[in-house]
Image: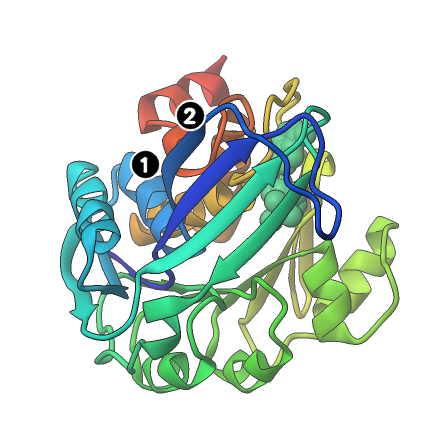
Amino acid sequence: AVHIVGSINLDIITSLDHLPLPGETVMAKATARLPGGKGANQAVAAARMGAQTRMVGAVGNDDAGRWMRERLARDGIAVSGVVALEGVETGTAYIAVDAEGENQIVVVSGANARLTPPGPVNEGVLLAQLEVPVGALLPVFRNSKCIRILNAAPAVLAADVLLDHVDVLVVNQTELAAFACCGPVDALPAVVREARSLIRHEDQAVVVTLGARGSVAVKKHWDIHVPAVPVIPVDTVGAGDSFCGALAALLDEGRSLAEALPWASAAAALCTLGQGAAPSMPMRAAVADLLSG
Ligand code: ADP
């Protein structure tokens, strides 16, 4: 199974003609409420790829928390590991998007910041991101005997202590630059070099996602470049989450990293064709069709 330890947010999205300046009031036409949080998004992505998926996280004892649990359960995700905490709200992201697609986001971590360390995972795949406290993740990564994947997003540098206990690290270019303490890296040889600098033990892999250029995977004496599937994106929000969830699902099936990456790449490409993150996570059949077509 894929065990996800991560954030659960309610995303409240408004569409505006232009983003408000300080002190300005801008009228929006409507509000959309969508499931969000990197943890929840990646859980949906893994479940739709056919993995038996278990979510571990925290919400508030409120309507948003109950709604998020119900949304996850609807995708077949086991939610008994999602605790409802008293005296704290469910994590919420307030997102404003203007006519050009530029956005402004305010996030209230809420219950996510109060997640306590869950027990170890001793089968399948562990997948976590950095929207929950590093202190809650360290014992799980240290003690679990399974394939441990860390999507080091957002770039919380305190997560450096986790890297010794990770089997597959997934970062985008911004996160690579932050963790490798280098400037912006763009050329593939430089990406490979900086990714390799993050390897802490034999057999560890680092995957760097490169947007429309695909991804690069690096081990100590091995590297590959997996091109993106060419698409005309509608909304790239959630592409990284789709990539990570699909990767976890395929590794859980016993596929090698080299076999799993094209699936992750195809899933992420399909995700860019729909609005939002969780709602546009593709089903396995659609990903398989894209790969065979
Ligand atoms: P993040 O959204 O986390 O910054 P990336 O932009 O690197 O991550 O995207 C993650 C993955 O999504 C990429 O490795 C790629 O496989 C896929 N992807 C992103 N943008 C596109 C695109 N324009 N066309 C095709 N695939 C894309």
Q: CA distance from mark 1 to mark 2?
A: 8 Å
The answer to which of 96 and 40 lies nearer the viewer is 96
Label 1 is placed on what type of residue? Met
Query: Ligand 1 is located in which of the four quadrants?
Result: top right
Number of other residues with Cα within 10 Å of mark 1, as a class: few under 14, some 14 to 19, many 20 or more? many
Number of other residues with Cα within 10 Å of mark 2, as a class: few under 14, some 14 to 19, many 20 or more? many
Per the image, the residue denoted by label 2 is: 287
Q: Earlier in the sequence, mark 1 or mark 2?
A: 1
Per the image, the residue denoted by label 1 is: 49
Residue at image point 48% right, 37% down? 13
198 relative position to 169: left or right: right
Disc 1 + disc 2, Cβ < 8 Å: yes
The response on whether ligand 1 sits within 8 Å of label 2 is: no
- Residue 119: where, in percent of width, then height? 21, 80
Label 2 is placed on what type of residue? Val
The answer to which of 223 and 155 lies nearer the viewer is 155
